[in-house]
Image (cartoon, rainbow, N blue to C red):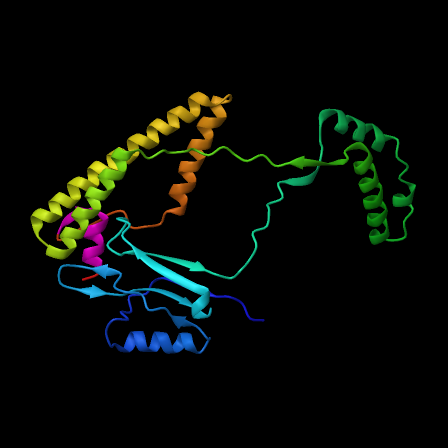
Amino acid sequence: ENKSLVLMGDVNFDRLTENTDNTLFEEDLLTYGIRRLPLPATRITHNSRSSIDCICTNLLEDKVSFSITETGISDHLGQSCSFHLGLKRTHENRSSFKRIYSRRNLENLKATLALENWDSVHNSLDAEEAFKSFQTIMARTLDHACPKKRTRTKCKSKLKIYYDEEVMMMKDDFLRAHYKYEMTGNESDRITMITKNKAYDIKLRTLKRNSAAEHIAQSNNKSKALWEIINSEKQNKLSCSSLSSLEIDGKIENNPYLIAEHLNL
């Protein structure tokens, strides 16, 4: 069966230069009917330009489009990909049938089972017949005492962080400093980039802290709201497996740009 396939990621095979690794990579893809899209340079420094990230697909050219953008997350440019498949968005069904185990229903279940005749189970000829009889009785009793009802799934309230004009300006300043350092490689430009990056990070943490405080203050169940934030942070930390620090020339470095520069040497 034909399926739409898309592969995205950092492959470290530069498609802008002739090299054996990229040739073998693209030839292997073609054996599966997949081609590598012609991304421009995705990693730019003051003395090099390389396209070492990839978007690979078996979709026709008119069914897929891509773009490159500066994200400031790493020393690679970000890649986004859109698919034009003509699919209609289906409305999510937020209701479902759920058995109601209220205290009253459980008491009713207990009383009904106490009055149930279990002779069909005890008098069965083998274990399979006994189990089927037991299962039939339990299913019938559950449907009577704890019937299924349609319930509507509530959307969990998520922590909303609102980015003001100041934080967007700080992001733009940092990205300009980052781009300048990529072009020049000067130490002074590197220091400027790091300074603006730290200021931007502090601003983001402040906004996140204020949003968390507001989320708790506006919640009717403050304990629940607090645990929602804690569990969300735990989940983010568990899903994050990126390198946080690295020893470079005898010094522990935690700046992601300098770590990436060192690893890509």
**In terms of image quadrants, where is residue 195?**
top left
> Which residue is depicted at the point 88% across and 34% down?
116
**In terms of image quadrants, where is residue 236?**
top left
Position of 257 relative to 62 (above/below) = above
Q: Along the horizontal axis of the image, is 42 left or right of 47?
A: right
> Residue 61: x and y, percent?
43, 69
Which residue occupies the foreground of this view, 232 or 84?
Answer: 84
> Residue 187: x and y, percent?
8, 50
Q: Which residues are magenta?
A: 250-263
> Which residue is depicted at the point 20% across and 60% down?
44
Does any portion of residue 248 appear in the rendered image?
no
Q: Is residue 257 magenta?
A: yes
Which residue occupies the foreground of this view, 127 or 233?
Answer: 233
> Residue 118: x and y, percent?
89, 39
> Which residue is depicted at the point 32% across and 50% down?
242
The N terminus is located in which quarter?
A: bottom right
Q: Along the horizontal axis of the image, is 215 left or right of 250?
A: right
